[in-house]
Amino acid sequence: MRCPSARRCMPPWATSKTAATWRCRSAARRPVRRPPRAAVSWARWSGSSTSSDGPAALDRTALQRNEPEHAMAPWHIGLIGFGEVGGIFGRALAAHPQVAGIHAWDLRFQRDPAFRQRVPAPIVAADSCDALCARATLVISAVTAANTLAVARQAALAIRPGAVFLDLNSASPGVKRQAAQAIEAAGAHYLEAGVMTSVPPYGIRVPMLIGGTQAGTMAPALAALGMDARPVSGRIGIASAIKMSRSILIKGLEALVIESYTNARRYGVEDHMLPTLAETFPGIDWPALGGYLFSRVAKHGQRRAEEMAEAARTVEETGIAPILARAIADKQQWVARLAADGAFEGLSEQDGWRAYSDRIIARTTEVPAPTPGHQDAQVN
Protein backbone atom coordinates (compact mmCIF):
# COMPACT_ATOMS: atom_id res chain seq x y z
CA MET A 1 0.00 0.00 0.00
CA ARG A 2 1.28 3.46 -0.86
CA CYS A 3 0.02 6.68 0.55
CA PRO A 4 -1.30 9.17 -2.06
CA SER A 5 0.85 11.76 -0.32
CA ALA A 6 3.93 9.55 -0.10
CA ARG A 7 6.31 12.50 -0.11
CA ARG A 8 4.76 13.87 3.08
CA CYS A 9 5.15 10.53 4.84
CA MET A 10 8.71 9.88 3.73
CA PRO A 11 11.59 10.19 6.21
CA PRO A 12 13.40 13.53 6.00
CA TRP A 13 16.54 11.98 4.52
CA ALA A 14 14.72 10.48 1.51
CA THR A 15 14.69 12.65 -1.60
CA SER A 16 11.88 13.10 -4.09
CA LYS A 17 13.48 10.43 -6.28
CA THR A 18 12.34 7.79 -3.82
CA ALA A 19 8.77 9.08 -3.45
CA ALA A 20 7.40 6.68 -6.03
CA THR A 21 8.55 3.64 -4.12
CA TRP A 22 8.37 4.77 -0.50
CA ARG A 23 6.00 2.67 1.65
CA CYS A 24 4.03 5.06 3.83
CA ARG A 25 4.66 4.66 7.55
CA SER A 26 1.07 5.47 8.38
CA ALA A 27 -0.07 2.89 5.83
CA ALA A 28 1.89 0.31 7.78
CA ARG A 29 -0.38 0.97 10.72
CA ARG A 30 -3.61 0.66 8.75
CA PRO A 31 -5.31 -2.70 8.19
CA VAL A 32 -4.60 -4.00 4.72
CA ARG A 33 -6.11 -6.84 2.76
CA ARG A 34 -3.55 -9.61 2.60
CA PRO A 35 -3.52 -12.61 0.27
CA PRO A 36 -4.14 -16.05 1.75
CA ARG A 37 -1.37 -17.16 4.11
CA ALA A 38 -0.02 -19.70 1.61
CA ALA A 39 0.41 -16.97 -0.99
CA VAL A 40 2.15 -14.44 1.25
CA SER A 41 5.62 -13.51 0.02
CA TRP A 42 8.27 -13.83 2.71
CA ALA A 43 10.89 -12.19 0.56
CA ARG A 44 10.86 -8.86 2.38
CA TRP A 45 12.05 -10.03 5.80
CA SER A 46 12.46 -13.78 5.94
CA GLY A 47 13.72 -14.98 2.57
CA SER A 48 11.89 -16.96 -0.07
CA SER A 49 9.19 -19.30 1.20
CA THR A 50 10.01 -21.76 -1.55
CA SER A 51 13.72 -21.99 -0.89
CA SER A 52 15.08 -24.93 1.05
CA ASP A 53 18.70 -23.82 0.88
CA GLY A 54 20.73 -22.61 3.82
CA PRO A 55 20.22 -22.66 7.57
CA ALA A 56 17.90 -19.63 7.50
CA ALA A 57 15.38 -21.14 5.09
CA LEU A 58 11.85 -21.01 6.48
CA ASP A 59 11.49 -24.05 8.72
CA ARG A 60 7.76 -24.76 8.55
CA THR A 61 8.07 -28.34 9.78
CA ALA A 62 9.38 -27.21 13.15
CA LEU A 63 6.51 -24.79 13.78
CA GLN A 64 4.15 -26.54 16.17
CA ARG A 65 0.40 -26.08 15.94
CA ASN A 66 -0.33 -27.03 19.53
CA GLU A 67 -1.61 -23.85 21.13
CA PRO A 68 -0.09 -22.64 24.39
CA GLU A 69 -2.38 -22.95 27.37
CA HIS A 70 -3.13 -19.24 27.36
CA ALA A 71 -3.01 -18.55 23.59
CA MET A 72 -6.58 -17.29 23.48
CA ALA A 73 -7.89 -13.87 24.47
CA PRO A 74 -8.34 -12.20 26.83
CA TRP A 75 -4.64 -11.70 27.51
CA HIS A 76 -3.00 -10.66 30.74
CA ILE A 77 0.09 -8.78 29.56
CA GLY A 78 3.30 -8.35 31.53
CA LEU A 79 5.88 -5.86 30.25
CA ILE A 80 9.44 -6.19 31.53
CA GLY A 81 11.20 -2.96 30.64
CA PHE A 82 9.29 0.31 30.32
CA GLY A 83 11.63 2.38 28.18
CA GLU A 84 10.90 3.62 24.68
CA VAL A 85 9.91 0.23 23.22
CA GLY A 86 8.12 -1.03 26.31
CA GLY A 87 6.17 2.20 26.57
CA ILE A 88 5.09 2.09 22.93
CA PHE A 89 3.92 -1.52 23.18
CA GLY A 90 2.29 -0.92 26.55
CA ARG A 91 0.19 2.03 25.44
CA ALA A 92 -0.96 0.22 22.30
CA LEU A 93 -1.86 -2.99 24.12
CA ALA A 94 -3.58 -1.22 27.00
CA ALA A 95 -6.24 0.03 24.61
CA HIS A 96 -6.78 -3.33 22.91
CA PRO A 97 -10.11 -5.10 23.54
CA GLN A 98 -8.41 -8.51 23.77
CA VAL A 99 -6.27 -7.39 26.71
CA ALA A 100 -7.84 -7.95 30.12
CA GLY A 101 -5.05 -6.25 32.03
CA ILE A 102 -1.49 -5.03 31.64
CA HIS A 103 1.29 -4.68 34.20
CA ALA A 104 4.77 -3.25 33.75
CA TRP A 105 8.02 -3.70 35.62
CA ASP A 106 11.26 -1.78 35.23
CA LEU A 107 14.34 -1.65 37.47
CA ARG A 108 13.97 2.14 37.51
CA PHE A 109 10.77 1.72 39.50
CA GLN A 110 12.97 0.90 42.50
CA ARG A 111 15.44 3.74 41.98
CA ASP A 112 13.05 6.46 40.83
CA PRO A 113 9.56 6.56 42.40
CA ALA A 114 8.65 9.47 40.11
CA PHE A 115 9.32 7.29 37.06
CA ARG A 116 7.03 4.63 38.50
CA GLN A 117 4.29 7.19 39.03
CA ARG A 118 4.49 8.28 35.39
CA VAL A 119 3.28 4.88 34.15
CA PRO A 120 0.02 5.80 32.39
CA ALA A 121 -3.29 4.19 33.32
CA PRO A 122 -4.62 1.61 32.71
CA ILE A 123 -1.10 0.14 32.82
CA VAL A 124 -0.28 -0.89 36.38
CA ALA A 125 3.26 -0.71 37.76
CA ALA A 126 3.98 -4.14 39.24
CA ASP A 127 5.60 -4.52 42.64
CA SER A 128 8.26 -6.88 41.29
CA CYS A 129 9.28 -8.90 38.26
CA ASP A 130 8.12 -12.08 40.01
CA ALA A 131 4.68 -10.62 40.74
CA LEU A 132 4.31 -9.57 37.11
CA CYS A 133 5.31 -12.98 35.74
CA ALA A 134 3.06 -14.87 38.15
CA ARG A 135 -0.10 -13.27 36.72
CA ALA A 136 0.77 -12.71 33.04
CA THR A 137 -0.23 -15.03 30.21
CA LEU A 138 1.97 -13.08 27.77
CA VAL A 139 5.25 -11.67 29.08
CA ILE A 140 7.05 -9.22 26.79
CA SER A 141 10.72 -8.57 27.50
CA ALA A 142 11.94 -5.20 26.19
CA VAL A 143 15.16 -4.47 28.06
CA THR A 144 18.72 -3.68 26.98
CA ALA A 145 20.68 -6.33 25.11
CA ALA A 146 23.04 -6.85 28.05
CA ASN A 147 20.12 -7.80 30.32
CA THR A 148 18.43 -10.26 27.94
CA LEU A 149 19.55 -13.46 29.63
CA ALA A 150 19.34 -12.16 33.21
CA VAL A 151 15.73 -11.08 32.69
CA ALA A 152 14.75 -14.42 31.14
CA ARG A 153 16.28 -16.31 34.05
CA GLN A 154 14.55 -14.05 36.56
CA ALA A 155 11.22 -14.44 34.79
CA ALA A 156 11.62 -18.22 34.74
CA LEU A 157 11.49 -18.27 38.55
CA ALA A 158 7.84 -17.16 38.61
CA ILE A 159 6.38 -17.45 35.11
CA ARG A 160 3.11 -19.36 34.76
CA PRO A 161 3.30 -22.77 33.07
CA GLY A 162 1.81 -22.43 29.60
CA ALA A 163 2.43 -18.68 29.43
CA VAL A 164 4.26 -17.14 26.46
CA PHE A 165 7.52 -15.20 26.86
CA LEU A 166 8.09 -12.86 23.88
CA ASP A 167 11.72 -11.71 23.80
CA LEU A 168 12.07 -8.48 21.79
CA ASN A 169 15.68 -7.88 22.77
CA SER A 170 18.61 -7.62 20.38
CA ALA A 171 20.82 -10.50 21.48
CA SER A 172 22.94 -13.13 19.79
CA PRO A 173 21.48 -16.51 18.78
CA GLY A 174 23.49 -18.18 21.55
CA VAL A 175 22.08 -15.88 24.22
CA LYS A 176 18.55 -16.38 22.88
CA ARG A 177 18.98 -20.17 23.07
CA GLN A 178 20.09 -19.91 26.71
CA ALA A 179 17.11 -17.68 27.48
CA ALA A 180 14.80 -20.19 25.80
CA GLN A 181 16.19 -23.03 27.91
CA ALA A 182 15.44 -21.11 31.11
CA ILE A 183 11.87 -20.23 30.13
CA GLU A 184 10.96 -23.62 28.72
CA ALA A 185 12.40 -25.43 31.75
CA ALA A 186 9.77 -23.54 33.76
CA GLY A 187 6.99 -24.94 31.56
CA ALA A 188 6.37 -21.74 29.58
CA HIS A 189 6.80 -21.07 25.85
CA TYR A 190 9.71 -18.98 24.59
CA LEU A 191 9.29 -16.88 21.47
CA GLU A 192 12.23 -14.93 20.09
CA ALA A 193 11.64 -11.82 18.03
CA GLY A 194 13.96 -10.01 15.67
CA VAL A 195 12.72 -6.42 15.46
CA MET A 196 13.69 -5.42 11.95
CA THR A 197 13.63 -1.62 12.08
CA SER A 198 13.24 1.34 14.41
CA VAL A 199 10.12 1.02 16.58
CA PRO A 200 8.87 4.65 16.93
CA PRO A 201 7.83 5.21 13.29
CA TYR A 202 5.74 2.03 13.25
CA GLY A 203 4.68 1.60 16.86
CA ILE A 204 3.39 -1.85 17.72
CA ARG A 205 3.18 -2.60 13.98
CA VAL A 206 6.98 -2.64 13.66
CA PRO A 207 7.98 -5.60 11.44
CA MET A 208 9.24 -8.54 13.49
CA LEU A 209 10.50 -12.01 12.68
CA ILE A 210 9.62 -14.58 15.32
CA GLY A 211 11.10 -17.99 16.03
CA GLY A 212 10.43 -20.91 18.33
CA THR A 213 8.29 -24.02 18.33
CA GLN A 214 5.18 -21.91 18.96
CA ALA A 215 5.95 -19.28 16.30
CA GLY A 216 3.39 -20.62 13.85
CA THR A 217 0.64 -20.70 16.47
CA MET A 218 1.46 -17.35 18.01
CA ALA A 219 1.83 -15.34 14.78
CA PRO A 220 -1.95 -14.96 14.24
CA ALA A 221 -2.47 -14.38 17.97
CA LEU A 222 0.08 -11.55 17.95
CA ALA A 223 -1.43 -10.19 14.73
CA ALA A 224 -4.79 -10.04 16.49
CA LEU A 225 -3.10 -7.83 19.10
CA GLY A 226 -1.92 -5.47 16.37
CA MET A 227 1.63 -6.75 15.82
CA ASP A 228 3.32 -7.50 12.51
CA ALA A 229 5.03 -10.76 13.52
CA ARG A 230 6.08 -13.27 10.87
CA PRO A 231 7.27 -16.78 11.81
CA VAL A 232 10.65 -17.55 10.27
CA SER A 233 11.72 -20.80 11.96
CA GLY A 234 10.88 -23.25 14.69
CA ARG A 235 14.52 -23.10 15.76
CA ILE A 236 15.65 -20.47 18.24
CA GLY A 237 18.41 -18.25 16.86
CA ILE A 238 17.41 -17.86 13.22
CA ALA A 239 15.39 -14.67 13.72
CA SER A 240 18.18 -13.24 15.87
CA ALA A 241 20.84 -14.12 13.28
CA ILE A 242 18.88 -12.16 10.67
CA LYS A 243 18.43 -9.23 13.03
CA MET A 244 22.09 -9.16 14.13
CA SER A 245 23.39 -9.40 10.56
CA ARG A 246 21.25 -6.40 9.65
CA SER A 247 22.35 -4.49 12.75
CA ILE A 248 26.01 -4.67 11.74
CA LEU A 249 25.17 -2.76 8.57
CA ILE A 250 22.67 -0.28 10.06
CA LYS A 251 24.62 0.57 13.22
CA GLY A 252 27.80 0.53 11.17
CA LEU A 253 26.34 3.17 8.86
CA GLU A 254 25.52 5.28 11.91
CA ALA A 255 29.10 4.99 13.17
CA LEU A 256 30.55 5.76 9.74
CA VAL A 257 28.37 8.83 9.29
CA ILE A 258 29.29 10.21 12.71
CA GLU A 259 33.01 9.72 12.19
CA SER A 260 33.05 10.85 8.56
CA TYR A 261 30.84 13.91 9.02
CA THR A 262 32.60 15.07 12.19
CA ASN A 263 35.99 14.66 10.55
CA ALA A 264 34.84 16.66 7.52
CA ARG A 265 33.37 19.33 9.81
CA ARG A 266 36.61 19.58 11.75
CA TYR A 267 38.57 20.17 8.55
CA GLY A 268 35.90 22.52 7.18
CA VAL A 269 35.31 20.46 4.05
CA GLU A 270 31.78 19.13 4.62
CA ASP A 271 30.27 21.27 1.85
CA HIS A 272 32.62 19.58 -0.59
CA MET A 273 32.36 16.06 0.78
CA LEU A 274 28.58 15.67 1.07
CA PRO A 275 27.78 16.40 -2.61
CA THR A 276 30.11 13.57 -3.61
CA LEU A 277 27.98 11.19 -1.55
CA ALA A 278 24.87 12.38 -3.36
CA GLU A 279 26.57 11.68 -6.68
CA THR A 280 27.58 8.17 -5.65
CA PHE A 281 24.34 7.32 -3.82
CA PRO A 282 21.53 9.38 -5.39
CA GLY A 283 18.13 9.32 -3.76
CA ILE A 284 19.38 10.07 -0.24
CA ASP A 285 19.44 13.50 1.36
CA TRP A 286 22.76 13.01 3.13
CA PRO A 287 22.60 16.12 5.36
CA ALA A 288 19.11 15.16 6.57
CA LEU A 289 20.20 11.56 7.08
CA GLY A 290 23.10 12.85 9.14
CA GLY A 291 20.75 14.77 11.43
CA TYR A 292 18.60 11.69 11.92
CA LEU A 293 21.50 9.31 12.62
CA PHE A 294 23.36 11.70 14.93
CA SER A 295 20.19 12.28 16.96
CA ARG A 296 19.37 8.57 17.28
CA VAL A 297 22.86 7.61 18.43
CA ALA A 298 23.03 10.56 20.83
CA LYS A 299 19.75 9.41 22.37
CA HIS A 300 20.22 5.64 22.28
CA GLY A 301 23.97 5.12 21.96
CA GLN A 302 24.23 2.95 25.08
CA ARG A 303 21.52 0.60 23.86
CA ARG A 304 23.10 0.49 20.41
CA ALA A 305 26.54 -0.25 21.86
CA GLU A 306 25.13 -3.20 23.79
CA GLU A 307 23.34 -4.44 20.68
CA MET A 308 26.57 -4.27 18.70
CA ALA A 309 28.38 -6.21 21.43
CA GLU A 310 25.75 -8.91 20.84
CA ALA A 311 26.28 -8.58 17.09
CA ALA A 312 30.00 -9.15 17.65
CA ARG A 313 29.14 -12.20 19.72
CA THR A 314 26.91 -13.41 16.88
CA VAL A 315 29.78 -13.15 14.40
CA GLU A 316 32.19 -14.76 16.84
CA GLU A 317 29.84 -17.72 17.28
CA THR A 318 30.43 -18.53 13.59
CA GLY A 319 34.21 -18.53 13.99
CA ILE A 320 34.67 -15.25 12.10
CA ALA A 321 36.64 -12.46 13.76
CA PRO A 322 34.14 -9.64 14.56
CA ILE A 323 36.61 -6.86 13.83
CA LEU A 324 34.14 -4.33 12.45
CA ALA A 325 31.30 -5.22 14.81
CA ARG A 326 33.55 -4.49 17.79
CA ALA A 327 34.73 -1.22 16.28
CA ILE A 328 31.12 -0.17 15.69
CA ALA A 329 30.29 -1.01 19.30
CA ASP A 330 33.23 1.12 20.46
CA LYS A 331 32.08 4.11 18.41
CA GLN A 332 28.50 3.82 19.66
CA GLN A 333 29.77 3.56 23.25
CA TRP A 334 32.00 6.58 22.72
CA VAL A 335 29.03 8.70 21.65
CA ALA A 336 26.97 7.29 24.53
CA ARG A 337 29.59 8.50 27.02
CA LEU A 338 29.51 11.98 25.51
CA ALA A 339 25.72 11.98 25.77
CA ALA A 340 25.87 10.87 29.41
CA ASP A 341 28.18 13.83 30.10
CA GLY A 342 25.58 16.21 28.65
CA ALA A 343 27.33 16.94 25.36
CA PHE A 344 24.08 16.95 23.38
CA GLU A 345 21.83 18.61 25.93
CA GLY A 346 18.98 20.48 24.24
CA LEU A 347 19.65 19.18 20.73
CA SER A 348 17.20 17.36 18.47
CA GLU A 349 17.14 16.02 14.93
CA GLN A 350 15.79 19.35 13.69
CA ASP A 351 19.02 21.07 14.77
CA GLY A 352 20.90 19.16 12.09
CA TRP A 353 24.03 17.07 12.17
CA ARG A 354 26.38 20.07 12.34
CA ALA A 355 25.08 21.02 15.79
CA TYR A 356 25.87 17.52 17.08
CA SER A 357 29.23 17.47 15.34
CA ASP A 358 30.21 20.83 16.81
CA ARG A 359 29.41 19.55 20.31
CA ILE A 360 31.58 16.47 19.70
CA ILE A 361 34.46 18.60 18.44
CA ALA A 362 34.18 20.97 21.40
CA ARG A 363 34.21 18.09 23.89
CA THR A 364 36.96 15.98 22.37
CA THR A 365 39.72 18.34 21.28
CA GLU A 366 41.44 21.56 22.27
CA VAL A 367 43.79 21.44 19.29
CA PRO A 368 43.41 24.40 16.88
CA ALA A 369 41.46 23.65 13.73
CA PRO A 370 43.54 22.02 10.97
CA THR A 371 44.85 24.48 8.42
CA PRO A 372 43.62 23.04 5.06
CA GLY A 373 40.10 24.49 5.29
CA HIS A 374 37.85 25.32 2.37
CA GLN A 375 40.41 27.14 0.24
CA ASP A 376 42.71 24.14 -0.01
CA ALA A 377 39.73 21.86 -0.62
CA GLN A 378 38.90 23.88 -3.74
CA VAL A 379 42.26 23.23 -5.38
CA ASN A 380 41.98 20.74 -8.27
Image (cartoon, rainbow, N blue to C red):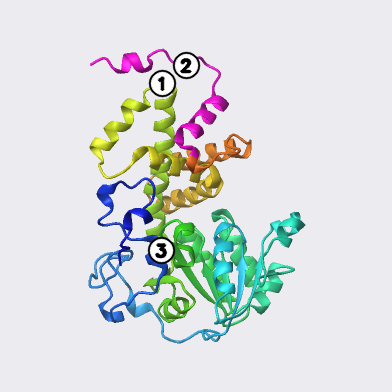
| Residue 84: % across, % down | 57, 57
Nearer mark to the viewer, of 3 and 1: 3
Q: Earlier in the sequence, mark 1 or mark 2?
A: 1
Examine the rendering and report whether any part of residue 326 can be seen. Answer: no
Q: Nearer the viewer, residue 38 or 66?
A: 38
What is the x, y in percent for residue 249? Answer: 37, 48
Expressed as whole percent of the image width and height from the top left, the position of residue 354 reads 46, 32
* Neighbour tally class for label 1: few under 14, some 14-19, many 20 plus, Cα within 10 Å: some
- The stretch in magenta equals 351-380
Three-letter amino acid code of the residue under disc 3: Ser
Q: Mark 1 touching mark 2, by CB under 8 A?
A: yes
Element type at mark 1? helix
Q: Which mark is residue 26?
A: 3
Mark 3 vs mark 2, CA separation in Å: 45 Å
Residue displayed at 70% across by 56% down: 108
For the residues labelled 3 and 1, the Cα–Cα distance comes to 40 Å
Quadrant assignment, res 317: bottom left
Residue 267: image tag: 1
Q: What kind of residue is marked 1?
A: Tyr
Q: In this rendering, would 111 be left or right of 311? A: right
Name the dominant secondary structure of the magenta segment: helix
